[in-house]
Amino acid sequence: MDKTAKERLPRVPVKKILAELAAAYPEARTALDFANPFQLLVATMLSAQCTDKTVNSVTPGLFARAATPAEMAGTPVEEIGALIQRCGLWRSKAQHIHDACAILASDYGNEVPADHAALVSLPGVGRKTANVVVSNAFSIPAIAVDTHVFRVANRLGLAAARTPEETERQLMRRIPRRDWAQAHHWLIWHGRQVCVARNPRCGACTLLAYCPTGKALSRAPARKGGD
């Protein structure tokens, strides 16, 4: 018996949870601004440890300077870095973007491939970034697990995982394939608006009746104030 067959996930009403999320966030989609797969790839690479708002503020200038992978590869790394300085880890991101675009220009006809394995082989591109690109740019079902998806999925009992990779695998088992991409957005929006990292708004959550974590927090006695 393989590992996935041995995993016992929490017994929660998956269909009802997904229906509530769909009703709460019918317009959920990526907050990153992009016009094509290349722009989405670069924007997603920039979004690590950085807000989407900040990414959206720097990408117009970056893409005005380099509108294609070949143009980005021909741009000095220092110049790329100067254009993305407001993003966290900008030095390493500038190098990764430059190197990834050089490969896209030389090996993929100056295009972003609609292939997950090819994407994760690029410098600075992990599973989450590849999943964001294939699902949002090419409409290929995928679940990208960022900090919000990881937190919310495990709090709701949709997953019981210690890593993003485990969370992704478990969500793929429990959520219908046709809903993978949209469920990713639902979980992100819920994590940003209600199920925040600290002091989640359980009292305002329409999923409270189904959420093991929320019910446990609601039953916990209030802490007394200090002296």
Image (cartoon, rainbow, N blue to C red):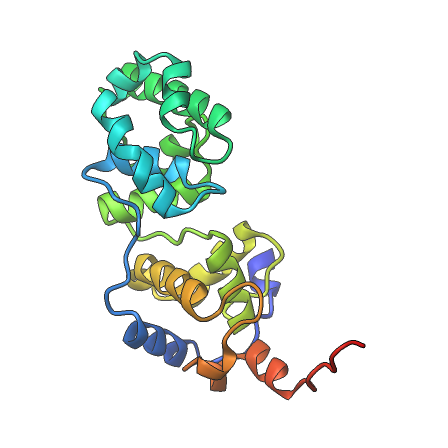
| 182 over 41 or under it: above or below | below
**Residue 94 in picture, x, y percent from top left:** 42, 23
Q: Residue at x 39, y 54 (%)?
A: 143
Q: Is residue 180 visible?
A: yes
**Residue 192 in picture, x, y percent from top left:** 43, 62
Q: Place residue 179 in its image quadrant.
A: bottom left
**Residue 220 in picture, x, y percent from top left:** 67, 84
Q: Place residue 226 in its image quadrant.
A: bottom right
User: In the depicted view, which residue is nearer to us: 110 or 35?
Assistant: 35
| 59 over 209 or under it: above or below | above
Q: Residue at x 46, y 59 (%)?
A: 149
Instruction: Please indicate whether residue 74 sits to the left or right of residue 211 in the image.
Output: left
Q: Is residue 157 visible?
A: no
Quadrant in the picture for the C terminus? bottom right
User: In the depicted view, which residue is nearer to us: 206 or 164?
Assistant: 206
Q: Residue at x 29, y 48 (%)?
A: 135
User: In the depicted view, which residue is nearer to us: 215 or 176?
Assistant: 215
**Residue 92 in picture, x, y percent from top left:** 50, 25
Instruction: Please indicate whether residue 92 sits to the left or right of residue 142 in the image.
Output: right
Q: Residue furthest front?
A: 227
Total marks shown come to 0
Quadrant in the picture for the N terminus? bottom right
Q: Place residue 97 in its image quadrant.
A: top left
Instruction: Please indicate whether residue 140 sits to the left or right of residue 89 in the image.
Output: left
Q: Residue at x 31, y 39 (%)?
A: 57
